[in-house]
């Protein structure tokens, strides 16, 4: 867990580092949060670990305690058992045999040396003796209990002691463990913190460096952190494993030590007890054999007694008593016993019985009493055996039980030792000399111990004998160690050696214990750290993957950003290039065109004129192409913004149609415009762009229409189309009612019905009508149509229907693309339907603002319109739609009552009370008409007859006029101004011709009257002219000739209302001057907060009006610009922004 | 007397029209003339004299700048041309203005030859204009002296 937390460190930190730019406080709070979180995580991990660890330890401890207590209990019990059996045997011996013994014992107990020597046995006997008067049975029980208490207390104290030590150890270990975990976690935290701090500082320092670099660095840092984390995780788990393993090994060793010590003590105790018995036996012999005359013991008594008390010495295979006989005494002794002293012989190391008389020696030790098991050694001289002799000599010199080194026992083939006690005739003092002891010696009591069976028996009694193998060695001679018991099996690597004290200081014995099996694989130590390791590696892998992914994503992101920047730069560069190049081409082209125009004004012959005109036309084409490219570039770079100014749509369409009528007439195409009466007179939008779209579409139509048919521009509201049943618009009705292609068109040639393209418009699909004025414009032609396979790429820039198109018709194919963009800018849609051979109908929508009818805009025409109000007119036209168009134009000029008749014949009834008859040339029949006129009653003035012609040759025209039947001939396309003009002439109302008086200057004068204006220009001429122009409008003009002077004049407070500033001036140019003025104003505004804010309108005067300059002007604080020399309209619109309030 | 005036007026009209036609003047001059009223009767003359003073000064400057052997400070020349362009467009001296545009382009292209040529042309052109205008003013004066009115000439 701590690993996980640690691993999560870098990432958390990383994210924070990344966010550092966002806000410092967020980071701080996040750091705090993170630290708290981290701390919590670590703490919980720690607690978990400690808990598991301590529980593990506690378990171990408990186990150990339980084991040790049970073993000690067992030991105690065994001890108790042993002592009980001992005591039983003793008591039974004492009580059964005779009471004399106890008396003897009592007597002897007076001897302090004896008391000391015989230890517990003596004290027991004294106690027994003391309480003799009381009930014997109870006594025995009491004693038993007493002894048991004694034993248990001693052993329990031992147990307590042992457990105390153990407990201490465990606590120490636990504390150590706890601390080392703490230290680890602490060090990791501190390390992480230090690194984090360092990193943060680094980040702070390098925050201004490149993103990329930082990204790379952070990636590297993350990797390092991950490596550190994995390293920490691995080392932690290794440490954990090592720690646990050590503990297990320690436990194992502990167990081995405990068991070995336990076995050694038990063996030693058993041996000692047994030895004490032998000692007691020696005392018995000394007391009853030598102390009594005659002897109370003979061979039979001895063997019987020893046989009966053999249970007390389960370890001895037999005991025997040998008498000290000097050579001088030999004969007497032999006689006395009736056998000669025999020599001990060893044959093949097996047989003992020697039957040859012993050789002459100073001293003999013939066995006189022997236990039944070893009765064969009676009369054998023990001095004759090498081991025995040494033993005897040592025993009598020391006065203690001595042991032989292990040798093959007689008869039984086991290794064994002989324990020998010397029997003295007197009670020797404790510190008796060797000489004294030698003299006092009267005999020797020997007991043979069968070592293997001894140890075997013991081990049988102890628990977990299977797990441990025991070896017992005699190490008296360090160079040649004699193995007394055991086999060389088991795990040799671990061994515990316990020394054994069998009461003979000369002999040294050791017990070697080892486990029978090799230590098992420490799963307990392997598993948890293993899991931790696996988790660490997994986490490491996951984080590594994550980091790699982050790195790659970041890299990708960087690449993308780079590419994006590059692409954008390229795009901008392209647009700029286009704009610049276009501009650069346009400037000289203007010169070329101007010169050509001048050239055409000079005296040229026809041929030269033709050349010049061609050149001029081509130049114009080139200019328009350049303008288109410029537009495209502008749109693409997003620099094109639509204006929002009110304009008269009908007037604009009139303009377009008049502009294009020439071309159309050349080709013999009829051009007509129709605007639905529901469309507001004045709408708000970008007239020039709208015009551009229409011109594009109509231009295309003209280009692709050959010698026949028509081009029909119609404008409706989309709401009209949405609710087709409510509409009263004839054209729309007709359109909605007809099929895909209809012949009922303007010119009678079939055309494609526009409704096909409307269906795809989204604006008709959603039925929310809350939009502003949305116009639907349709341009219908009867051209060649667009091939189906080319229809999909019609709006792609520089893409034409096919390459042959450009050859046939010219053009760049950019117009439609621009139109589409413009329509999109107007929040509209563009679409088309086309059938090859029939024609194409383009439709587009656009959203415009609506405004109340601007009274001034049409004021000009109002008067004339009023003149025509109340007139009655009849339109005679075979084509319904064309008649509708004519009606629309008539209604525009105020002729309210318009009838329609398809031919003269049908119109005959309607000819009464008419003021005007408009006859289309197609319906014109001279004869018929002249007949009709003759029928007319001449009471009333006959209606004025106007002929509407699409294209007529001059001769035709004059012919018609001269016939006198027609009052006026109007060339189509109809336009308001043309119509008014014509009507005025026809109706004879000579309206004031000089109506076009300057209206705007009046306005300008009003605007500027009394205004104080500062003109800044270094050129005297310019200054003078500007002065004069502005003065003309009533402004009070002050002139200065430099930027510096201007700044001085405009330093607030001043009383100028506006300033016109030249841009290019020596010393201080217009930009710089404006900047300074703005600075001054700001300063002033700051000082006098509440009073008026100073902001003098500053307008740039510049000769070259290009976009960049304009932007620069705005940038440095100018409010606008006017081109030099002043143009009234421009001046008006610029100035109006500031004064028209 | 009237005949003289009419003749002078006719002459004046033709002369002015020829000035426009030959490209010496443009609309701006017309505008300038419109600005002349009773409050400032000599406005046009004043402005033109200012313009010619400018011309003399600027052409002198440019000539000095271009006369330098070694490096020519085109930016300085450009600034002068710009000024000249501004003032010529203000008075409607069409030919001078056109030459200025060309001159400026040469300047930006650091085309020494072109600059020198343009400068010479400008020098010729403005002097020619000056003579023509002088003639025109003389005509005007004659008309006024003859008691006539100077006619308005629209292109």
Image (cartoon, coloured by chain):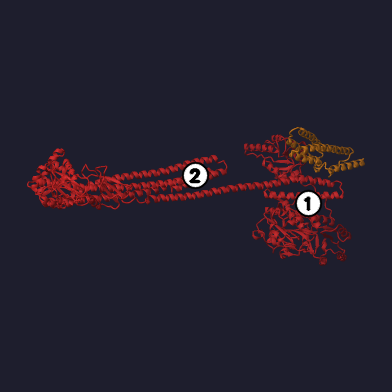
SS for tag 1?
A: helix
User: Alpha carbon of mark 2 to alpha carbon of mark 1: how far?
Assistant: 83 Å
Q: Name the residue under label 2.
A: A224
- What chain is tagged by disc 1? A
Tell me what hue chain A is rendered in: red
Of residue A1075 and residue B149, the one placed in the foreground of this image is A1075
Residue A359's spot in the image, x, y percent?
14, 45
* Image-quadrant location for residue A679: bottom right
Sequence order check: which comes first, mark 2 or mark 1?
2
Decide: is A877 above or below B27. below
Residue A28's spot in the image, x, y percent?
50, 43
Decide: is A755 above or below A611. below
Lateral position of residue A904 relative to residue A120, left or right? right
Judge depth for marks 2 and 1 and give the one in front. Answer: 2
> Which chain is the one coloured orange?
B
Which residue shows up at 55% across the image and 41% down it?
A207
Q: Quadrant of the C terminus of chain A?
A: top right
Is residue A123 visible to us here?
Answer: no
Direction left: furthest residue: A294
Is residue A255 visible to us here?
Answer: yes
Determine which of the numbered discs, if any, sits on residue A860 in the image.
1
Residue A451's spot in the image, x, y percent?
22, 49
* Image-quadrant location for residue A848: bottom right
Residue A506's spot in the image, x, y percent?
21, 42
Neighbours of disc 1 within 10 Å: few (<14), some (14-19), many (20+): few
- What chain is tagged by disc 2? A
């Amino acid at each position: 867990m701590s690993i996980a937390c640690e691993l999560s460190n870098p990432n958390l930190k990383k994210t924070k580092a990344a966010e550092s730019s966002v806000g410092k406080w967020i980071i701080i709070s996040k750091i705090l949060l993170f630290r708290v979180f981290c701390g919590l995580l670590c703490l919980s991990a720690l607690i978990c670990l400690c808990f598991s660890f301590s529980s593990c330890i506690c378990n171990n401890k408990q186990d150990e305690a339980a084991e040790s207590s049970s073993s000690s209990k067992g030991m105690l019990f065994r001890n108790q058992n042993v002592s009980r059996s001992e005591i039983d045997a003793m008591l039974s011996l004492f009580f059964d045999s005779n009471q004399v013994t106890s008396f003897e014992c009592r007597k002897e107990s007076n001897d302090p040396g004896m008391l000391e020597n015989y230890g517990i046995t003596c004290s027991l006997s004294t106690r027994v003796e003391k309480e003799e008067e009381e009930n014997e049975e109870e006594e025995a029980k009491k004693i038993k209990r007493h002894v048991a208490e004694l034993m248990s207390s001693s052993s329990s104290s031992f147990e307590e002691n042992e457990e105390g030590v153990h407990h201490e150890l465990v606590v120490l270990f636990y504390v150590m463990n706890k601390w080392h975990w703490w230290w680890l976690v602490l060090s990791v935290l501190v390390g992480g913190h230090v690194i984090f701090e360092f990193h943060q500082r680094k980040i702070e320092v390098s925050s201004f460096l490149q993103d990329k670099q930082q990204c790379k660095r952070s990636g590297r840092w993350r990797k390092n952190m991950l490596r550190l984390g994995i390293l920490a995780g691995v080392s932690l788990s290794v440490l954990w494993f090592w720690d646990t393993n050590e503990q297990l090994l320690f436990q194992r060793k502990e167990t081995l030590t405990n068991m070995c010590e336990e076995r050694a003590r038990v063996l030693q105790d058993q041996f000692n007890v047994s030895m004490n018995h032998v000692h007691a036996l020696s005392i018995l012999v000394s007391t009853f054999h030598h102390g009594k005359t005659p002897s109370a013991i003979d061979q039979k008594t001895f063997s019987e007694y020893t046989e009966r008390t053999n249970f007390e010495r389960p370890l001895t295979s037999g005991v025997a008593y040998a008498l000290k006989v000097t050579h001088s005494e030999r004969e007497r002794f032999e006689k006395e016993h009736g056998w000669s002293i025999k020599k001990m012989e060893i044959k093949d190391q097996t047989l003992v019985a020697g039957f040859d008389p012993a050789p002459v020696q100073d001293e003999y030790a013939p066995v006189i009493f022997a236990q039944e098991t070893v009765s064969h050694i009676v009369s054998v001289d023990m001095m004759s055996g090498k081991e025995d002799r040494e033993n005897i000599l040592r025993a009598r010199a020391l006065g203690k039980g001595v042991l032989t080194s292990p040798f093959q026992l007689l008869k039984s083939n086991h290794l064994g030792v002989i324990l020998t006690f010397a029997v003295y005739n007197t009670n020797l003092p404790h510190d008796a000399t060797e000489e004294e002891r030698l003299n006092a010696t009267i005999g020797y009591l020997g007991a043979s111990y069968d070592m293997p069976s001894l140890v075997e028996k013991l081990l049988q009694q102890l628990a977990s004998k299977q797990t441990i193998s025991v070896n017992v060695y005699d190490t008296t001679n360090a160079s040649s160690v004699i193995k007394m018991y055991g086999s060389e099996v088991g795990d040799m690597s671990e061994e515990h050696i316990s020394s054994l004290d069998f009461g003979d200081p000369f002999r040294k014995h050791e017990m070697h214990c080892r486990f029978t099996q090799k230590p098992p694989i420490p799963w307990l130590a392997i598993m948890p750290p293993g899991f931790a390791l696996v988790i660490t590696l997994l986490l490491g892998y996951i984080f590594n993957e994550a980091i790699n992914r982050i790195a790659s994503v970041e890299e990708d992101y960087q690449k993308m950003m780079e590419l994006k920047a590059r692409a954008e730069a390229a795009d901008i560069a392209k647009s700029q290039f286009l704009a610049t190049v276009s501009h650069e081409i346009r400037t000289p082209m203007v010169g070329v065109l101007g010169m050509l125009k001048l050239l055409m004004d000079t005296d040229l012959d026809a041929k030269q004129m033709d050349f010049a005109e061609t050149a001029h036309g081509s130049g114009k084409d080139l200019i328009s192409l350049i303008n288109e490219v410029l537009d495209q570039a502008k749109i693409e770079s997003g620099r094109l913004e639509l204006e929002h100014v009110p304009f008269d749509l009908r007037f604009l369409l009139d303009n377009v149609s008049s502009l294009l009528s020439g071309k159309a007439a050349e080709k013999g195409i009829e051009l007509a415009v129709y605007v639905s009466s529901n469309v507001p007179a004045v709408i708000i939008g970008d007239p020039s762009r709208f015009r551009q779209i229409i011109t594009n579409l109509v231009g295309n139509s003209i280009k692709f229409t050959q010698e026949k048919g028509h081009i029909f521009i119609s404008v409706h509201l989309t709401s009209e189309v949405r609710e087709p049943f409510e509409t009263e618009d004839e054209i729309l009705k007709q359109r909605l009612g007809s099929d895909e292609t209809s012949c009922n068109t303007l010119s009678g040639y079939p055309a494609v019905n526009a409704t096909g393209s409307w269906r795809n418009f989204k604006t008709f699909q959603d039925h929310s009508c809350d939009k502003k004025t949305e116009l639907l414009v349709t341009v219908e032609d009867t051209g060649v149509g667009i091939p189906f396979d080319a229809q999909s790429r019609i709006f792609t820039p520089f893409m034409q229907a096919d390459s042959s198109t450009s050859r046939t018709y010219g053009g760049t194919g950019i117009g439609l693309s621009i139109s589409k963009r413009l329509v999109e800018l107007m929040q509209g849609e563009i679409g088309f339907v086309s059938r090859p051979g029939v024609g194409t109908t383009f439709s587009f929508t656009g959203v415009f603002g609506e405004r109340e009818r601007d009274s001034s805009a049409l004021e000009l025409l109002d008067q004339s319109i009023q003149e025509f109000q109340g007139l009655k007119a009849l339109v005679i036209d075979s084509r319904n739609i064309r008649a509708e168009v004519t009606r629309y134009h008539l209604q525009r000029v105020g002729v309210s009552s318009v009838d329609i008749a398809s031919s003269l014949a049908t119109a005959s009834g309607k000819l009464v009370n008419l003021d005007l008859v408009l006859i289309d040339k197609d319906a014109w029949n001279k004869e018929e008409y002249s007949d009709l006129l003759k029928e007319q009653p001449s009471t009333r003035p006959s209606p004025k007859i106007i002929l509407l012609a699409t294209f007529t040759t001059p001769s035709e025209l004059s012919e018609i006029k001269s016939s006198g039947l027609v009052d006026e001939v109007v060339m189509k396309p109809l336009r308001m101004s043309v119509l008014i003009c014509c009507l005025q002439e026809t109706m004879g109302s000579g309206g004031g011709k000089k109506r076009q008086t300057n209206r705007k200057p009046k306005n300008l004068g009003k605007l500027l009257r009394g205004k104080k204006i500062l003109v800044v220009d270094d050129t005297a001429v310019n200054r003078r002219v500007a002065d004069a122009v502005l003065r003309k409008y009533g402004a009070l003009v002050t002139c200065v000739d430099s930027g510096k002077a201007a700044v001085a004049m405009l330093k607030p407070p001043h009383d100028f209302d506006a300033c016109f500033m030249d841009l290019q001036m020596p010393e201080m140019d217009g930009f710089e001057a404006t900047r300074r003025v703005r600075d001054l104003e700001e300063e002033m505004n700051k000082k006098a907060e509440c009073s008026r804010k100073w902001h003098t309108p500053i307008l740039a005067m510049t000769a070259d009006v290009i976009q960049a300059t304009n932007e620069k002007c705005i940038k440095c604080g100018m409010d606008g610009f006017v081109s030099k020399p002043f143009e009234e309209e421009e001046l008006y619109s610029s100035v109006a922004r500031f004064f028209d309030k | 007397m009237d005949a003289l005036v009419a003749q002078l007026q006719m002459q004046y009209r033709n002369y002015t029209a020829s000035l426009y036609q030959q490209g010496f003047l443009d609309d701006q001059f017309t505008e300038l003339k419109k600005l002349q009223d009773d409050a400032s009767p000599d406005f046009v003359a004043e402005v033109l004299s200012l313009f010619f003073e400018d011309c003399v000064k600027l052409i002198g400057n440019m000539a000095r700048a271009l006369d330098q052997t070694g490096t020519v400070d085109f930016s300085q020349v450009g600034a002068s041309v710009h000024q000249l362009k501004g003032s010529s467009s203000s008075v409607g001296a069409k030919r001078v203005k056109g030459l200025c545009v060309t001159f400026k382009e040469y300047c930006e292209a650091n085309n020494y030859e072109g600059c020198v040529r343009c400068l010479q042309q400008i020098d010729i052109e403005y002097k020619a204009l000056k003579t023509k205008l002088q003639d025109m003013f003389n005509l005007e004066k004659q008309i006024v002296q003859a008691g006539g009115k100077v006619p308005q000439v629209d292109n």
